[in-house]
Structure formats: C-alpha cells, structure tokens
Image (spheres, rainbow, N blue to C red):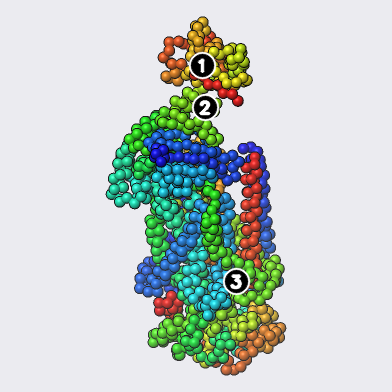
C-alpha cells in the first residue's frame, strides 16, 4: 500500500501521453512530417477559424443538451427504481446496463432504421394518418444526433443517480414531511439537494461519453451532424496535420474541462450524509382503487424509458432473422442463415475471442490497480490524494480519437507493439479511473473503525484486506469490473488506433458497417443480448431462492 | 455463520475455476498459432481487396504470413501508418495521394523489373503517368474505378451533367461521399475549372459557391460503401456522387432500380496503387505484389468484389470472370476508345490543406 | 364536547399488521393524551411502540381504528398536514443544511418570511443552548448537539403534540440525565403534549405524567409512574419496570383462608386470589436485610446466606441464597451493616409491597 504505483500510473498513462499531445500542438508540420520548431501557428489558425468555433460550440451544446435530457429521463426512472419499487431493484438496474453490452454501433445503426425515410417511425406515422408522407425531420438532422446522444446518456445518468437516491435515508423524508413539507417540497428541499452531486457526476459521465464521439453523428447526423471529433480525426487522418489536430484536441479538452468544472460546481452540496442507508418505508396502507390506478400509471411511465432503451435492440434481433443483406425496411423474409454463418465467419470469431481476451485483461489490470490505488488514496499513502484522484481520471475526459493517437504515441515511445498489449494499456487508461471512482466512493462510506478493529484483532494489513476490507467492498468491485468490461467491450475509437492487425469485435463491426456488412453481426449481438438476459434472470432466481431459503432458516 | 459460508463457498470457487478455464481456452488459439520463419507481410488494405482465405493460401504456398489490416477510410490510411500504429509493408493508395506518402517517406520507389506481371495491366490504363513522382515510379495499380453520377432510375432518366445534383427538385435527396480528395475534383469539374487539380483563386471561389449551394441539397454524406448502399436503399437519397459503382450494382441486386452515368464534364476516376514501405522493400514482398497481378489472382478479385481490377477484358474472361460480373464492372465499357476521354484520373491537388479546410467548413455549414 | 376538549389526542381501537407478518404489530390499542401531558410509551424493542408513534405522526396507516386529534379525525391526514412534530431516533437532520436552516425548515414550509423564521429559529436554538452552533453543518456536531438541534427543529413551530422516538438512546449517561431535565423543563415551559417512546424505564418513570407499558403490540398497563412501579398489573410489567425478585410460591387452602408458601414457609399478610402455584414479585429496594436473630415484626421473613454484593454507589445490591432461591435486596450503601459473602442474614419484606401473579 505504497503511493508509488499511483504516481507511476499517472506519469505513464496520463502525464506523458498528454504532454506529447500538448507538445505536438506547438509544433510545425512540413510535407507530412512534424518538424521540431515551436510555434503557435495552430492556435492562431484556430483563433481565426469560424468553423472551428462553430463546431466546438455545437459539439459542446449537443452533448450538453443530450446529457441534460438523459438526466431528465433517468432521474424519474432512478427515483422510481430506488425509492418506490420494493424488492428486486437490482434487476431494474441491470436491465438498464444490458443494452450497454450490445455494441453502440449496432444500437446507433438500429436508430437509423427506426428514424429513416422508410423506417418504423415514419411508417407508423403515415399508416396511422398522423403524417401525410414520410418526414425527413427524424434522421440526418440535429434532432437525430440529440436523440441518439440522449439514448447513450441515459444508462450513465441512471446508474449514478440511482446509487445516490438509494442512499438517502428514509428518515430524512419523514422528517421533512413531519416538518410540514408536502411531497413536492420534500423533493425540492431534501431529495434534490442530496442527489444533486450524483446528478452532476451522471451528467458529466454522459457528457463525456458523447462529446468526443464522432461515429454516432457520422452515422445518424447526416451532414448537419458534423461534430468537432470528425475534424480532429481528419486532421490526424487525411490532412495529416498533427499539430493542428492536437491544437483542436487541446481546445476541446480545455472546453470540456470548463464545462465539467461548472457542472461540478453547480452540483456541489454541503454536508456529509451520515446515518442509516436508505431505509425504506415499512409499508403503505391498504390500497385504494385510485391508488392502484396511480400505481399502474406510474409503472407504465416507468416502462417507457426501458422501451426507448430496448427499441434498437429489438430492431437488431429482427434484422438477424431478415433474409436481405441490406439493413433497411421492409423486411424480406425469415431466415436462420445468419446464425448458421456465425460459425463459419473466422474473422468475426477471431474478433470476438480477442474482444473477450482484451476485456478480461483490461478488467483484471484495471480492477487490481483500482483496488490498490483506492486503498492507497483512501488511507493516505498518496500525497495530494485529491489531485491524483482527479488527475487519474483525465483520460476519461479525452475524446476517443485523441486518446487513441495519444496512446499510440506513448506506446510507440516505449516500443510496445500494436495488438492486444497496446489495446489493454489504452483501454485501461480510461477503465481504471471509472472503477477507482466506484471503489473509492464505497470505501468512503465504510466505517473507519473497520480496519482498526481488524488490526486490533491481530490481523496484519494483508489479512485485514482479505478478510475484512475486500468483503466489504466486494459489491463495488464487482460493479466496477462489470462496468469496466462494458466500457472495454464497446470501445471503438481508441481501439481503432491501437489494434493494428488485430481488431476487436466493435472495430471489426465498424469496418463492416462501412464495407460489406454481414447480418451475422446482428446474429452475434442478438446472442450476446439473449445470453446476458438469461444470465441475469438465472442469477436473480438463484439469489432469490437462496434468500428465501435463508429466510426460512 | 459457518454453515452459510459452507453453503456458498464451493459455488464461488467453481465460478472462479470456470472463469480461469474460459480464459485459458480463449488464450489458447493465440498461443498455438502457426509460426512462420520470415517476418510477416503486413498489408494496409481496403475491404474486398485481400480476402483472408486468399492470403492464407498465399502464405502457405510461400511460407510467409500475410496479415491484411482492413481500413475503412482515407483518414485511417493516413493515421495508421503515420502514427506508427501499424507498420505496413504494403499499402494501397490512390494516385492523388501517392506524392504525399512519398514525401512523408512512407513509401519508397519501386523496382518494376521485379514485378513482371505489370504486363497484365490493361494497356488502356496509362498508369505510369500517374504513379511517377520525382521521376521514379512509386506505385503499381491494383484496382481502378470510376466515380460517376448515380441515380434512382424511377425518379430520373440518365442525367448527363453534375448540375442535377444542384437541382432543387432533389433537395435533401442528394448524397455525396465523405472524402474531400474525391468530392473536390467533381466540384471543380462542375464549375468548369480548366485543371481540376490546379485551381486558381477565382476557381476556388466558384467551388466555395457551389459547395454552399450543394449543402442545401445534401442531408447526409456516406461514410463507406455499405453506408451508401443503406442510405440509397432506405430512400434517404435518390441521386448522388457515386464512390464506387459496386454501390449501384449492389442496389440493383436488392431490386432497386438504380443506375449510373458518366457526366459530360468528366468523371473522376481513381487508381489504387500498391505502395511499398522501406520495411517492405524485400524480395518476398515483390513476389506478393507480382502474384497479386497474376490473371488468376486478379480474376478472383474481380469476381468477388465486382471491382475493375487491372485486367483487360480478354484477360479477365480468360481468368474466368463470369459474364454477369463483367457486366457490372467498367471493364467492357472501357474497351471503347472514347471511354477514357470522359474520365479524369485523380492527381495531387495544388493545395490540399485549403481544399480540406473548405470541405470541413462545408460539412460544418460555416463555409 | 367538553370531554373532547380535554383530550388532545385519542387513539381508538387501532390494529396494524404488516405485510407478510404473522403477528400484529399493534393489537387493539386505545388511549388518550391530555393537553400538556408528558406521556410515555415504554416497552422492549419489537413491542410496537415505534409503530404506534409513526402512526400518530402519520407515517403509517392503521388497518382498523381511528386517530383523533383535538376532536378531529386525522387518520387519513398526511403527515405534513398534522400539527404533530417528531424528534427522530436517528435525529434525521438534513445533512446539506446548516443547523439554523434545519431549525428554520418547518417555518419555511409553513410559509414564514425569511427574517421571521431565522429569528424564531435562533430563539429556539437558544432555548436548547445551541445558539453558538447555528452555522455548523450536522456532521460537524456531536451526538448530543445533534439531538438538541433535532429537538429545536421539532418545537420551533410550537406543535400541540411532540413525538419523541427514543431521543436519548445514543447519548451517554451524563448527557442523558442533562437532557432529561431539559426535556421536562421545556415541556413545562412550552405546554406541549409530549409523547415519548423509550425502552428505558428510568426515563419513562422519571419524566412522565403517565406511562403506557407495551408488550407484543398491546398496552399491558397504563397509569402514573407510581402505579406502574408499585402496582404492576402483570408479571411482564413487574419485571420490565424497575428491578424485582420474582419468586415462585405455592398458594394453599389453610383453614378456609388462602395462604402463600415460600420455600414451604407461610408468608403472613400475602393475599392470593386462588390456590395453586404462583409467582410473587417484590422489588429489590423493598427487601430489607437484618441479622438472623432479629424479630420479623409482622413482616415476611426468610433466612439465607449472602452470596455476593454489588456496590452501586448510593446502594448495595446483596444477593442472598435462601434454600433454593436467590433473593436480591437493595440496601443503602451508607448503612453501617457490612455484608460479606457467607454471612447469615434474615430477609424481610412487607406483604403490601409484594404482588402475586397466577399463571
């Protein structure tokens, strides 16, 4: 439990790569090669570029709006799941997370089929007579980008808000009611201020997930969906002007930092939550007719966001049985061909296998590091712990394109060959901080006397960790690892640069989407989705059964 | 407490065991992969160019592994080798970008004498003119293609000018490809530039006007071959600048009545050339390139991709390309003498940065 | 109507069974509270006292029965419309509000202007001697301080009824005693009816006007502390309230009169309603010890040997072995008599201090 691994990680995966980026932004390029002549030319060019400023604002604005909408939708959902529903709450949470296991590309792609000219939405509106002819307003507009960004935002906002709401002791709500506050005013003066910091975190996560994403807007946004990420990518790509690209990336980073700082400032709340954890009301009175109706309506309202989350997945499942190779409506007929082809598609199976290996290694490396770092930070082995906690999370806030390039530079510097090793390093740089945050949050809620009690009982540090501390944070570790795997399994932008000759499944899919799409991709993700659903149902059954058994005993 | 622990411990342990086993199974094939004596040949290639099965076959015959890395966009073509993410031996670059790759030192000059199969390249293709940089050849064609005007034949009948893309009738229904290097020459041809690769300032201004007007017409830009097919198939576009005629044939396969025409202003045409890095300047790599130009290899490529390859009509037929496939390529048409006159082969532009900036401004809507 | 005006709160025939529970949490509970009364609900954990309190506050709904406040049925009135305030066991201070804001919160909800509510809140903080901590946040306070803030928040609106849910449970002994005095004087000053839930009989007896002892969802006994203490109506009350010896006796019919036998020895003056085995409760402090040769003077007596002695400061608890029984006597510590283990003593108690339970 020493501090040096934290410093080492920070230097290797945060400081050096970002210094390379900032350094590059002050260099000049000549005939496709970077020359080492310090200059501010790139920044001067940005200062004059109308389109850069416009795109930056548009990118920030769209992501901001989507994160806001995501929070607006996720908040009531989380509230309902955390404070109204009794029992089996974990399944509601998992149902929100499952869609994250299906490649984002696939989900975004499905949105295209819902929103397009001959898509489901238009077909529905025309056949029901609401619209005279298919509208062009749904796809390839700013609206479609906002919609899909919102779609991406919801799970992240939900998870963060849910954990906060679940933690608020019920006695505070009662104390407020007892003080004469109605439900709404209790919410305004007690629940909202107490959950606001987590809303800010959820908002920030959602914002970060979308602000650097240029694949989504390029797929559903049409020409109006052009975002700053595409410009960055083109500077590192076809323009081959790395200094200029780095300068844009640096500006984006700074702007994102400013937005996040503002959000965090807004979200801060005084005081420390102490006392019992989210005790639920023992029961409500006998249900009246009106109450039952209200409850039903609430249940329906609660289900709508889930429909929103699962609609694209349903499309994907549908397409996996569609005979035509073209991913568009109308469907051509039923077939199981794509499932049969799964086994024959060696390249895809390779990619699946690689994705699993990468995911496993990333989670392993990140979780082990995160546990160690969390303890080092929490138990004061790291100087300036607050700073490092924040600094380690910087890669999370770097748009994928930039992080990809930056990690290539860093790994190139130390001669790590492209492939699984590079991907694992690159992905760990942003997966580890996420797990770290989750574990730290849990550690801070832990009774400080726990470690002392264990050492008092004669256990050394290591034994205390194994027997006392780890069991008490196990939930957070598993949750973090799960989220880490989700992030790793779905990563495209960073991996694209690091994979070299060895694509992971999402990268392979990304190439497929543009050239020679095979519906077998639908089939494999359908299997992934069904598999994870089954796993969760079975786990739930087992847990439920063992709980029941324990209750009997 | 004790009995509860006993109740749960075995299941947890067995889960761990299971995970370990799964990890081992996953890792095994990677370890057991066949080892080759020589350093592998890494290709930075496009979808459909190098089927894994063909590479496998060649690898086994020659004892050197071939690793094709498929890229999806011109951006990746640049960023992957420049960043060092991939260190390819062979990459496939269109003629207009060859000088930039050469300048940056990513590709070296080629010794064509080591590639006797260049004789298989159709005589109609005056390739040396476009692959010569500073007096030496830096690329050998692998494939070529036209980028014509494509349209929904139910909506319009054989338009013969790029101007239809600016026709208000098709507002919101026009599609172009998201690639500055290929769209800009088309714009230049439309405004009647004398040399579409050497624009004057006045011509640049005209291009800017044309792009501004085009923006209202275009709702979405395609990011790739399949993307384009899907956009047209879903009815989100009815007319557009075609990246590859395989888009049209693919749509025809789906029962969509799409067609293409070569406008009178000229049709931009690309030639994808094999370029070799310093690392790839090895005899075995030359052998690979040479084999890639064999009639057998090329025919198989044409048949599978419905691209043009580099063969002459007679060679293609001899190599076993079916009539059906041939009809879908430009190969039969290219026999006609005046065909090539309608084409404008991509060359290095006068100021790439300026074009890209305009293109990015066009996309952002701030031009 | 006149009677109603004398009762600030009436709980009438309330039943409550929680979902999935086999036993009712509350079973036919009825009682009433006078204005300005200090009313305690005393019982072990799980006896339903907190449920009862939450029902009065409005957080639970009775399955059957009504809750009437000042003549008005409030059974269906939501908690925030009831003129009832609660001091929560966990204090439930809002962690994001300063002490002052916490105390001002009910006034804010009542729509008071800012200057007014801050002034009132300050005043109220002074009342519980927390005036110096107005700007602190709850997590910066000690347990006793939090407790006083919670109290201030509950009384700032001068409710007619104040509910206290084991408010002193988490405090140390000295603080608890201080707070007891403070609560009693506050209650007198404010003239608010206190309903005080506790499992500590000392608190209940020392502060209350009346005490309801609860057991398994029912009220076992309702009366003044004195009645509860000296005249427990059941074995449960006798054992739960105060410290009693519970001695097995045998009631036999002798010459037409029922006589109680302890260890086969008749006890004079003990009245038993019927024959058969029974138990007799006698409080520790009602047991005297004397030298074995002293006369009983009409009191019940039994001889024994001192087993052990606990020194409690103001008293000694002497455990005496009498045949097969242990009898504990609390005697003044200042007494000149020295009790050492092994010493022969005579145990004496008056018949009117003993209560006999059959069952």
Residue A218: x, y in percent?
51, 72
Q: Contact, CB < 8 Å: mark 3 with mark 1?
A: no
Mark 1 and mark 2 lie on one chain; the one further toward the N terminus is 2
Q: CA distance from mark 3 to mark 1?
A: 98 Å
Q: Residue furthest front?
A: C1
| Chain of the residue displaying label 2 | C
Badge 2, how many Cα within 10 Å: few under 14, some, many 20+? some
Mark seen at residue B49: none
Badge 3, how many Cα within 10 Å: few under 14, some, many 20+? many
Residue B286 seen in this snapshot: no
Q: Quadrant of the C terminus of chain B?
A: bottom left
Residue C59: x, y in percent?
48, 46
Is A363 situated left or right of A227 in this image?
right
| Image quarter of residue A107 | bottom right
Q: Are marks 2 and 3 on the same chain?
A: no
Q: Which residue is mark 3?
A: A512
Q: Which residue is mark 1?
A: C351
Residue A263 or C133: which is nearer the viewer?
C133
Q: Contact, CB < 8 Å: mark 2 with mark 3?
A: no
Residue C322 seen in this snapshot: yes
Q: CA distance from mark 2 to mark 3?
A: 85 Å
Residue A255: x, y in percent?
39, 63
Q: Which residue is mark 2?
A: C233
| Chain of the residue displaying label 1 | C
| Image quarter of residue B129 | bottom right
Q: Residue at x 47, y 27 (%)?
A: C228
Q: Secondary structure at mark 1?
A: helix
């Amino acid at each position: 439990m020493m501090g040096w691994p934290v410093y080492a990680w920070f230097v290797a995966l945060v400081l050096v790569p970002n210094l390379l980026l900032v350094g590059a932004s002050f260099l000049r390029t000549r005939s496709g090669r970077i020359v080492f002549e310090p200059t501010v030319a790139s920044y001067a060019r940005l200062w004059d570029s109308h389109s850069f400023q416009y795109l930056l604002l548009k990118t920030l604005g769209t992501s901001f709006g989507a994160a806001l909408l995501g929070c607006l939708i996720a908040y009531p959902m989380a509230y309902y799941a955390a404070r109204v529903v009794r029992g089996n709450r974990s399944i509601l949470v998992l149902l929100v997370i499952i869609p994250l296991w299906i490649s984002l590309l696939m989900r975004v792609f499905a949105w295209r089929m819902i929103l397009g000219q001959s898509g489901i939405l238009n077909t529905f509106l025309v056949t029901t007579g609401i619209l005279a002819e298919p509208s062009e307003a749904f796809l390839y507009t700013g609206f479609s980008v906002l919609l899909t960004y919102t779609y991406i935002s919801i799970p992240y906002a939900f998870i963060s808000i849910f954990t906060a709401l679940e933690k608020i002791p019920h006695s505070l709500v009662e104390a407020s009611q007892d003080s004469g506050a109605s439900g709404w005013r209790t919410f305004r003066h007690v629940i909202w201020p107490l959950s606001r910091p987590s809303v800010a975190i959820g908002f920030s996560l959602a914002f970060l997930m979308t602000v650097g994403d240029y694949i989504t807007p390029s797929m559903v946004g049409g020409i109006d969906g052009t975002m700053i990420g595409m410009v960055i990518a083109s500077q590192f790509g076809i323009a081959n002007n790395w200094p200029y690209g780095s300068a844009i990336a640096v500006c984006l980073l700074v702007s994102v930092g400013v937005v996040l700082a503002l959000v965090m400032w807004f979200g801060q709340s005084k005081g420390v939550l102490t006392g019992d954890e989210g005790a639920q009301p023992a029961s409500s009175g006998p249900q009246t007719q009106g109450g039952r109706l209200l409850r039903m309506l609430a249940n329906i309202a609660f289900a709508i966001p889930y429909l929103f989350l699962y609609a694209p997945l349903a499309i994907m499942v549908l397409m996996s049985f569609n005979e035509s190779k073209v991913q568009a409506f109308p469907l051509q007929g039923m077939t199981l061909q794509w499932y049969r082809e799964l086994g024959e598609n060696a390249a895809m199976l390779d990619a699946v296998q690689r994705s699993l290996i990468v995911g496993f290694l990333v989670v392993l490396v990140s979780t082990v590091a995160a546990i160690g770092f969390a303890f080092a930070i929490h138990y004061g082995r790291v100087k300036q712990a607050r700073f490092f906690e924040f600094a380690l999370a910087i890669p999370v806030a770097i748009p994928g394109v930039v992080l990809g390039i930056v990690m290539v530079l860093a790994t190139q510097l130390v001669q790590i060959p492209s492939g699984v090793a590079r991907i694992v390093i690159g992905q760990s740089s942003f997966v580890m901080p996420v797990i770290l945050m989750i574990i730290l949050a849990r550690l801070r809620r832990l009774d400080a006397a726990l470690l002392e009690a264990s050492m008092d009982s004669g256990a050394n540090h290591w034994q205390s960790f194994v027997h006392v501390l780890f069991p008490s944070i196990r939930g957070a570790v598993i949750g973090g690892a799960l989220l880490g795997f989700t992030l790793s399994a779905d990563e495209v932008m960073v991996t694209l640069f690091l994979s070299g000759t060895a694509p992971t499944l999402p990268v392979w899919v990304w190439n497929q989407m543009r050239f020679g799409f095979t519906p077998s991709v639908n089939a494999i993700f359908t299997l992934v989705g069904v598999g994870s659903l089954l796993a969760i149902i079975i786990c739930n059954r087992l847990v439920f059964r063992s709980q029941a058994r324990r209750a009997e005993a | 407490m004790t009995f509860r622990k006993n109740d749960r411990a075995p299941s947890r342990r067995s889960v761990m065991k299971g995970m370990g086993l799964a990890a081992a199974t996953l890792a095994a094939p990677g370890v057991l992969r066949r080892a080759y004596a020589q350093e592998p040949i890494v290709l930075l290639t496009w979808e459909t160019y190098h089927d894994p099965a063909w590479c496998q076959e060649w690898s086994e015959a020659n004892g050197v592994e071939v690793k094709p890395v498929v890229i999806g966009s011109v951006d990746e073509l640049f960023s992957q080798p420049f960043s060092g993410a991939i260190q390819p031996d062979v990459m496939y670059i269109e003629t207009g970008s060859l000088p930039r790759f050469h300048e940056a030192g990513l590709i070296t000059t080629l010794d064509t004498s080591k590639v006797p199969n260049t004789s298989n390249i159709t005589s109609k293709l005056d390739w040396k003119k476009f692959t010569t940089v500073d007096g030496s050849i830096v690329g050998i064609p692998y494939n070529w293609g036209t980028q014509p005007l494509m349209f929904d034949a139910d909506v319009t009948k054989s338009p013969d000018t790029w101007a239809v893309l600016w026709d208000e009738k098709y507002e919101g229904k026009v599609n172009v490809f998201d690639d500055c290097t290929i769209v800009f020459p088309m714009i230049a041809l439309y405004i009647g530039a004398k040399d579409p690769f050497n624009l004057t300032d006045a011509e640049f201004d005209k291009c800017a006007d044309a792009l501004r007007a085009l923006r209202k017409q275009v709702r979405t830009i395609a990011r790739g071959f399949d993307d384009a097919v899907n956009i047209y198939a879903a009815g989100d576009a009815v007319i557009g600048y075609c990246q590859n005629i395989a888009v049209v044939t693919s749509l025809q396969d789906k029962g969509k009545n799409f067609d293409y025409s070569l406008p009178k202003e000229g049709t931009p045409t690309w030639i994808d050339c094999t370029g070799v890095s310093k690392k790839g300047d090895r005899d075995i790599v030359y052998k690979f390139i040479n084999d890639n130009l064999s009639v057998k290899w090329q025919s198989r490529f044409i048949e599978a991709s419905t691209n043009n390859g580099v063969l002459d009509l007679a060679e293609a037929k001899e190599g076993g390309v079916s009539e059906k496939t041939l009809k879908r390529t430009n190969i039969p048409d290219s026999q006609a003498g005046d065909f090539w006159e309608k084409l404008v082969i991509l060359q290095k532009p006068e100021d790439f940065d300026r074009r890209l900036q305009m293109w990015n401004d066009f996309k952002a809507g701030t031009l | 109507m006149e009677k109603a005006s004398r009762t600030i709160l009436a709980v009438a025939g309330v039943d409550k069974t929680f979902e999935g529970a086999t036993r009712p949490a509350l079973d036919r509970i009825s009682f009433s509270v006078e204005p300005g009364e200090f009313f305690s609900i005393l019982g072990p954990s799980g006896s339903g006292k907190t449920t009862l309190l939450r029902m009065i506050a409005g957080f639970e709904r009775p399955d059957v029965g009504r809750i009437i406040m000042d003549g008005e049925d409030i059974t269906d009135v939501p908690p925030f419309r009831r003129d009832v305030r609660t001091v929560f066991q966990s204090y439930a201070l809002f962690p994001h509000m300063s002490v002052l804001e916490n105390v001002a919160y009910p006034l804010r909800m009542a729509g008071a202007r800012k200057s007014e509510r801050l002034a009132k809140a300050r005043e109220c903080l002074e009342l519980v001697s927390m005036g110096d901590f107005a700007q602190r946040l709850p997590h910066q306070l000690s347990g006793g301080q939090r407790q006083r803030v919670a109290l201030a928040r509950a009384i700032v609106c001068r409710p007619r009824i104040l509910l206290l849910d084991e408010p002193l449970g988490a405090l140390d002994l000295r603080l608890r005693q201080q707070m007891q005095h403070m609560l009693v004087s506050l209650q007198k000053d404010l003239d608010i009816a206190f309903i005080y839930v506790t499992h500590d009989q000392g608190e209940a007896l020392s502060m209350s006007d009346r005490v309801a002892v609860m057991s398994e969802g029912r009220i076992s006994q309702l009366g003044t502390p004195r009645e509860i203490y000296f005249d427990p109506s059941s074995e449960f009350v006798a054992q739960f309230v105060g410290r009693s010896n519970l001695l097995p006796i045998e009631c036999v019919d002798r010459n037409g009169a029922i006589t109680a036998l302890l260890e086969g020895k008749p006890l004079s003056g003990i009245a038993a309603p019927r024959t058969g085995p029974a138990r007799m409760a006698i409080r520790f402090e009602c047991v005297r010890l004397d030298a074995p040769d002293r006369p009983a003077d009409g009191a019940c007596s039994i001889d024994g040997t001192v087993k052990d002695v606990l020194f409690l400061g103001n008293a000694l608890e002497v455990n005496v072995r009498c045949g097969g029984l242990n009898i504990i006597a609390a005697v003044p510590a200042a007494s000149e008599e020295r009790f050492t283990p092994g010493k022969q003593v005579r145990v004496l108690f008056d018949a009117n201090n003993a209560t006999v339970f059959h069952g």
